[in-house]
Amino acid sequence: MGEGTALSSSGQAAIDWLSEGGSGKTSAAEMYAHGLLKKAGITAAQEPAQDVVQEVAINLWTYLTKPPPKELDTPVAYARTALHNHISKIKRGQTTELPEDLEQVATSSDRGKNFELLVRSKLESLGREDPWLTSAALSYYTLLMHPECAENLSELPSPAAGSTEAQARCWTALWISGQRELFPPRGAGSDPALRRKRARYIAQVIQRVEEARAAVAFSQQAKTLQTQKGAAHA
């Protein structure tokens, strides 16, 4: 999408997710957009998913390449939320361009207690069809925001040395949510199939939390922009 830009590596990851596909293959971004369009009651004839994804990719690229370089904590979740907001605006008949002063989705620890409560509420609203994932995501988020909660959970299964903090949190969160079959008996090792299955579950938990955080951050920024516009016209 051009050369000589100030696109950060995380920004490029978001653009890559939106731009992957081709050769007749439907990309993950297009499938996600198709689901959102269908849910919004917008037909493929009105707004093809591929066109929506391309437009969001262009808008996002334009925003991200404006200096200074912008780092994204969760590139895919950021791109998915941009798609969600874009389609919501299409449904309302509003402009689909991203605001120029859109803030980076900051980490939840920077946004205070209200942000934490909003993320929890968002996680609960996302989990009507998969209660285990909601439970695990809420547990993961609790451990993320309040690491001291893990102090009394040392007896639960934990990954081998060298694993990331996120993986360790996910092990605990999955155990608490009842997914005990993902872990080998005490003292035994995990076979390759079990490790792959557990990795898929871990990825789902982390993605769900990232999506909730990104959605709340976007919502708060939109409200801030609306307030600023209202004050400017007062």
Image (cartoon, grey):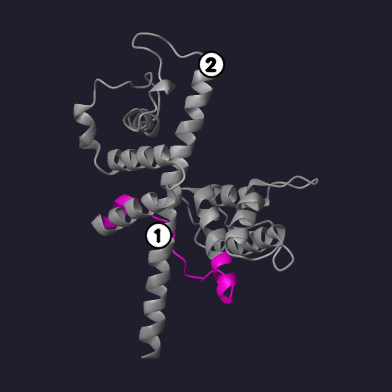
* Residue 91 magenta-highlighted: yes
- Residue at 28% in and 22% down: 156
Q: Secondary structure at mark 1?
A: helix
Residue that numbered label 2 is attached to:
192
Single out the mark in the foreground, 2 or 1: 2
Inspect the image, locate mark 1, and give the three-letter code of the amino acid beneath it. Answer: Ala
Vertical arrangement, residue 17 with respect to residue 93, above or below: above
Left or right of 132 in this view: 191: right
Q: Secondary structure at mark 2?
A: helix
Give the dominant element type of the magenta stretch: helix, strand or loop. Answer: loop
Inspect the image, locate mark 2, and give the three-letter code of the amino acid beneath it. Answer: Pro
The tally of labels here is 2
Q: In the rendering, at what x and y percent does residue 209 appear?
A: 41, 45
Q: In the rendering, at what x and y percent does residue 35 appear?
A: 61, 54
Spatial CA span between label 2 and label 1: 37 Å
Quarter of the image where the C terminus is located: bottom left
Density class for disc 2 (Cα within 10 Å; few <14, some 14-19, many ≥20) is few
Q: In the rendering, at what x and y percent does residue 126 appear?
A: 43, 51
Q: In the rendering, at what x and y percent does residue 24 appear?
A: 80, 47
Residue that numbered label 1 is attached to:
217
From the viewer's side, name the closer residue of 17 and 201: 201
The quadrant in which residue 224 appears is: bottom left
Magenta residue span? 87-112
For residue 124, say whether it is visible: yes
From the viewer's side, name the closer residue of 185 and 79: 185
Vertical arrangement, residue 193 with respect to residue 112, above or below: above
User: In the image as oriented, which residue stretches furthest toward the bottom?
Assistant: 234
Density class for disc 1 (Cα within 10 Å; few <14, some 14-19, many ≥20) is many
Dot placed on the residue nearer the N-terminal end, 2 or 1: 2
User: In the image as oriented, which residue stretches furthest toward the right?
Assistant: 23
